Image: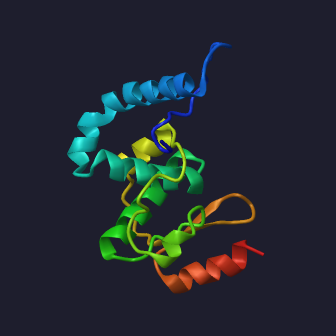
Amino acid sequence: PVGYLFPDTYFIPVTATATSTVKIMRDNFVRKIFLLMPEIERSGRTLEEIIVMASLIEGEANRGPDREMVSDVLWKRLKLGMPLQVDVEMKTYEFPGLPKKPINNPGLASIRAAISPSSTPYLYYLTGDDGNMYYSRTFEEHVAKKQKYIE
């Protein structure tokens, strides 16, 4: 079950089967997420929504503050009915809303970012060729930054 296998360092017995390995990873996910359930409930979102969003964040942002900012942009787009337009899941360009399932197994940082996005004035972001993320309020600003930071 993609999305619900916690990425971590595991010591898997040599005698482990695929089924027992999945169970170890799934049990670890349950342990980690159990501690976050009160925050998830306070967010007003379901566990499934949080994990799907966290999987998108995991694929899009690799630094703490960027995760929270991307989370804000994506939740905002969702609320506005805009397509999410996330490069790691191209179907988000065609269909509005969250994907039906997670696209990867997000780590704790991305899950926390999905639960608690930062508050930003932005509606767009991109990752430049230099690896930095650039944020914009308007589409015009976004296009200008795309021309400046992506070859």
Above or below, 110 against 8 in this view is below
- Residue 85 showing in the rendered view: no
Q: How is the image coloured?
A: rainbow
Above or below, 91 against 45 in this view is below
Front residue of this view, candidates 28 and 35: 28
Q: Is residue 122 left or right of residue 135?
A: left
Task: Look at 46% across and 57% down and name the residue there.
Answer: 69
Above or below, 47 against 29 in this view is below
Write down the quadrant of residue 34 in the picture: top left
Question: Residue at the bottom extreme?
Answer: 140
Write down the quadrant of residue 112 in the picture: top left
Task: Look at 56% across and 24% down and name the residue there.
Answer: 21
Front residue of this view, candidates 48 and 85: 48
Task: Look at 32% across and 34% down and name the residue there.
Answer: 36
Q: Position of residue 111 (x, y in %)?
A: 43, 43
Front residue of this view, candidates 10 and 62: 10
Question: Residue at the right extreme?
Answer: 151
Q: Position of residue 54 (x, y in %)?
A: 45, 49
Q: Position of residue 99 (x, y in %)?
A: 43, 62
Q: Position of residue 59 (x, y in %)?
A: 58, 53
- Residue 21 showing in the rendered view: yes
Q: Is residue 138 left or right of residue 79?
A: right
Label total for image: 0
Quadrant in which the C terminus appears = bottom right
Task: Look at 45% across and 30% down and name the residue there.
Answer: 26
Above or below, 52 against 77 in this view is above
